[in-house]
Image (tube, helix red, strand yellow):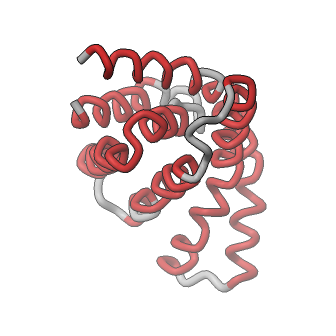
């Protein structure tokens, strides 16, 4: 099941590539984490591995080893019994924040791999801010689905 969920993440990313920086990965990461808690790392890393196999294990891939884990960890520390009203606000905002901070979170690995000093790393972050804004908007819209999809997946898991 976890392999299939990771494959869903990967296929959703491939299907959305026509729209740069817009995808369902943040939303799916949060849904899987809300429902499966620690075990959500399995489909997340299936996705990361499939991405490397498909596109190559080159330097751009290395930050994927921690970028999705950060969103997973942030989702893990959210209260499990958050109200529906709070969830419908908090989940999309966290998902959007991850998209907005994606370039900033990616930058330290880029700086180390490509020998950038701190100023060059900051310049790299600033140049990427418009794409991070697009990423945040897409994540916010997808994040609206986190609560209903997590509720649906929890119901499906109980019937299992």
Q: Position of residue 98 (x, y in %)?
A: 64, 48
In this view, 115 is above or below 25? below
Q: Is residue 46 left or right of residue 107?
A: left
In this view, 70 is above or below 10? below
Q: Position of residue 52 (x, y in %)?
A: 30, 52
The residue shown at (56%, 18%) is: 148
Point out the image quarter for the N terminus. top left
Q: Residue furthest front?
A: 81
Point out the image quarter for the C terminus. top left
1 and 7: which one is in front?
Answer: 1
51 and 159: which one is in front?
Answer: 159
In this view, 89 is above or below 155? below
The residue shown at (53%, 57%) is: 70
The residue shown at (42%, 33%) is: 35
| Residue 153 in which image quadrant | top left
Q: Position of residue 106 (x, y in %)?
A: 57, 63
76 and 2: which one is in front?
Answer: 76
| Residue 20 in which image quadrant | top right
Q: Is residue 19 left or right of residue 17?
A: right
The residue shown at (24%, 48%) is: 53
Give the total of numbered labels.
Answer: 0
16 and 35: which one is in front?
Answer: 35
Q: Position of residue 28 (x, y in %)?
A: 47, 33
């Amino acid at each position: 099941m976890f392999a299939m969920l990771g494959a869903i993440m990967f296929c959703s990313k491939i299907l959305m590539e026509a729209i740069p920086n817009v995808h369902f990965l943040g939303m799916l990461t949060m849904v899987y984490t809300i429902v499966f808690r620690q075990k959500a790392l399995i489909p997340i890393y299936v996705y990361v591995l499939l991405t490397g196999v498909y596109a190559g294990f080159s330097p751009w891939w290395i930050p994927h080893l921690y970028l999705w884990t950060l969103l997973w960890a942030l989702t893990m520390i959210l209260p499990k019994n958050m109200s529906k009203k709070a969830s419908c606000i908090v989940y999309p905002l966290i998902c959007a924040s991850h998209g907005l901070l994606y370039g900033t979170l990616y930058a330290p690995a880029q700086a180390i791999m490509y020998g950038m000093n701190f100023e060059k790393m900051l310049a790299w972050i600033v140049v990427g801010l418009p794409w991070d804004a697009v990423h945040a908007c897409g994540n916010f819209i997808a994040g609206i689905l986190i609560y209903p999809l997590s509720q649906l997946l929890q119901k499906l898991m109980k019937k299992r």
